[in-house]
Image (cartoon, rainbow, N blue to C red):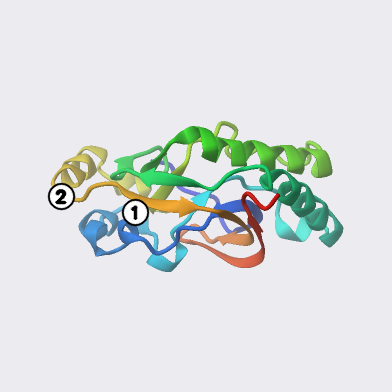
């Protein structure tokens, strides 16, 4: 599991509102606190839709333009239920895959399009292909010490099922990642279905 780059600050265009649900709690502590992993604290649990450029490189005018486009397009998107399954071992995190993917992917398409219209190709689309998920732990600087097989065995013994939550908004946040954890400060909120 490769590690993360050193500190970055990015505009996170659209975090689903769903922080603090049970998948971030003590249920997975035995797994998330193993060598090579950096656990996600409950208050920082999130479902990222799209990362944009570093906040210090995006002007207030550009943020307003992106937000306006996202707000206008999200007015036509109906709120939906998103189910998060048990964590699996991913490439850089322990992830709870989300379903259904189509309505969440629509939010990615909206935010990606708005970002491209305002920022052009200044920043790559991250992720380039979207699937909804919530990370409960990230690969840390000591990621080489993470034993993928042992993690899978630990996960198979945890008796937790999927959780669902109602997605009715996106949060535009200024995100920071220091290689150990992702944190953010709110910029604005966009409600779904406000037409």
Q: Which residue is mark 2?
A: 159
Give the alpha-carbon distance from disc 2 to disc 1, as whole Å: 21 Å
Question: Which residue is drawn at the image coordinates 24% and 53% (left, top)?
Answer: 31
Q: Which residue is mark 1?
A: 37
Residue 58 visible (yes or no)? no
Instruction: List x then y, in percent, for residue 180.
Output: 45, 60
Pair 2/1: label in front: 2
Task: Check the image and report above or below for 173 versus 118.
Answer: below
Instruction: List x then y, in percent, for residue 16.
Output: 53, 53
Q: Are marks 2 and 1 in contact (CB under 8 Å)?
A: no
Question: Which residue is drawn at the image coordinates 58% and 55% (left, top)?
Answer: 169
Task: Check the image and report above or below for 171 versus 48.
Answer: below
Residue 88 visible (yes or no)? yes
Q: Tag 2, which secondary structure?
A: loop
Instruction: List x then y, in percent, for residue 117.
Output: 81, 39
Question: Which residue is drawn at the image coordinates 62% and 43% (left, top)?
Answer: 77
Q: Relative to the observer, which residue lies in front, 15 or 175? A: 15
Image quadrant assignment for residue 1: top left
Packing grade of label 1 (10 A; few <14, some 14-19, many >=20) is many
Question: Which residue is drawn at the image coordinates 53% and 40% (left, top)?
Answer: 104
Residue at the outermost front position? 195
Instruction: List x then y, in percent, for residue 53.
Output: 71, 49
Does label 2 or label 1 sit earlier along the sequence? 1
């Amino acid at each position: 599991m490769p590690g993360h780059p050193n500190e970055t600050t990015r505009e996170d265009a659209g975090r689903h509102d769903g922080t603090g649900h049970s998948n971030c709690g003590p249920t997975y502590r035995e797994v998330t606190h193993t060598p090579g992993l950096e656990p996600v604290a409950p208050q920082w649990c999130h479902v990222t839709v799209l990362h944009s450029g570093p906040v210090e490189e995006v002007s207030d005018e550009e943020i307003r333009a992106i937000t306006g486009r996202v707000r206008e397009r999200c007015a036509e998107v109906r709120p939906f239920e998103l189910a998060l399954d048990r964590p699996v071992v991913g490439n850089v995190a322990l992830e709870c895959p989300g379903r259904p993917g189509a309505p969440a992917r629509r939010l990615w398409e909206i935010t990606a399009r708005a970002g491209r219209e305002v920022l052009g190709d200044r920043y790559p689309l991250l992720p380039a292909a979207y699937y909804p998920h919530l990370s409960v732990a990230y690969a840390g600087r000591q990621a080489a010490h993470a034993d993928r097989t042992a993690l899978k065995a630990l996960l198979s013994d945890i008796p937790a099922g999927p959780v669902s939550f109602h997605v009715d908004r996106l949060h535009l946040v200024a995100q920071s990642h220091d290689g150990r954890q992702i944190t953010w400060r709110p910029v604005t909120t966009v409600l779904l279905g406000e037409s």
